Image (tube, rainbow, N blue to C red):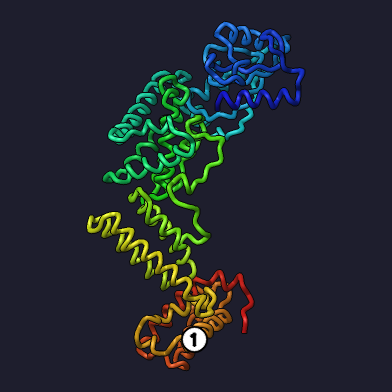
Amino acid sequence: MSRRICVELYNEIISLRPHWHNDDDTKGVIKVIMTGSSADVEAFQPHIHNKLRRKAIGERLKDENDELKIVIVRDMWLTGFDAPVLHTMYIDKPMQGANLMQSIARVNRVFNNAKEGGLIVDYIGLAQYLKEALVEYTISGGQGQPTLDDELAVAKCLEYYEGITHQLRFFDWKKFFALKPEEKLRYINITQDYIISQENGSDNFCDTTSKLLKAYALVSTHERIDALKDDIALFQAIRARLNKFSERTRIDGGGKTNAEIDIAIKQIVSDALVSEDVIDIFDAVGIKKPNIGILDEAFLNEIQGMEHKNLAVELLKKLLRDELKQKSKFNLVQSKEFSEKLEEAIQRYHNGQIDSVEFIEKWLVPLANEIRDANKRGEDLGLDYREYAFYTALEVNDSAVKILGDDILKHIAQELLKTVRNSTTIDWTIKESVQSALRRNIRRILRLHGYPPDLQEKAVDTVITQAKLLADDFLNNKTIDE
């Protein structure tokens, strides 16, 4: 997939078989075939040959009596090179279509009646692409249009690339490449903030980048496209950050990353995003390291003080949604209550009723504090998370219920947990008889403790729904303190 991999693989092999190495082009068991220049790093220089030297090595490989047995190749010898003696090809690079057919054709020649076909050792999973390439090859009668297809893909790649650069035309994104590693991370952050500030900016950028990566996967080795690989690597990094905060449905195949895009990402080997230094990620995006809880007050203050408010908005929205998603797995009432508040705030923000600063300061941060206080409330009452879930299911904010007092409500919640826990069995959530008996027991507990009669049925329904939410927890934890 890259020249660096070629050189490192060569070094690993000769560390095991030192006698295979020889600096002389006419000697040695193993060689590397790749392009390069005097400007390349020192480690590459022994493996960089001009056209004539590469041709001479190729002639050696065609000779069955020559000691040369293994060649590590990067983007060469796909066409115009025929060596019938070759019998095995090890592939660790994404390929498809005409390029894949041309590659495997290097080892499919009959040779001296001793070789009827070649062996393909696939390290990356090309079976599906090979099937598609064979179908295309068969339908076209073995002809195909590889040159035309490549040019079309190159044109598409350039079209999508220009679409992204047009979106960023008023932003100096090229500045990224001149920055130090820790500054690069911050600049991705700044670029993300700029994109989010545009109407539908995030969606447009992610959509176009996805299309760009698909086209790039087909023609990454083309000279015109290879020159853009650093830019494409940056666009992919920005897209990855945007997707972390994205509210939209993923377009890459029903929420899953398309395999073709994964391959394209692997092909982008660029120094643009590589650093040998240890970088503080939190510092790079402009916030200090938080305590363990994402709703920690100091952490919220840091986010509130972030320079890039659009990014702060997206970050807080994601953190809150993730927190409420976790809460929805065990606390029905609170997750519903807080989710409704969050969505109302988001709707106001999207409708332009409030700006990003007000959205953060008057809605998101207060809501985060409210969620944090609610989490602490259960601990202050001496209830575990399941008991507290039933406590909140009792509609404790209703004035008629609140008059019972915390001690009675705590006792009701604890009894409800024991009753539900002892009544549940496998598949109880779909057995009406079990649920009917459970409803009777819940009503009895509520009546016994003076729960308001007009609110009992609603409470019973909520408790049953809450119990179903904790069904797996009940079955996985068989014991409970009496």
Q: Residue at x 40, y 66 (%)?
A: 369
Relative horizontal placement of residue 425, taking residue 203 as reference (left or right):
right
* Quarter of the rendering occupied by the N terminus: top right
Q: Quadrant of residue 191?
A: top left
Q: Secondary structure at mark 1?
A: helix
Place of residue 124 in the rendered image (x, y in percent of width and height, measured from the top left):
58, 34
Label 1 crowd bin: few (<14), some (14–19), many (20+), radius 10 Å: many
Q: Amino acid at mark 1?
A: Ile
Q: Quadrant of residue 350?
A: bottom left
Q: Residue at x 38, y 32 (%)?
A: 175
Relative horizontal placement of residue 22, taking residue 56 as reference (left or right):
right
Residue 240 visible in rendering: yes
Place of residue 307 in the rendered image (x, y in percent of width and height, measured from the top left):
36, 49
* Residue 40 sits above or below residue 166 on the image: above
* Residue 422 sits above or below residue 473 on the image: below
**Residue beneath label 1, please?**
412
* Residue 331 sits above or below residue 217 on the image: below
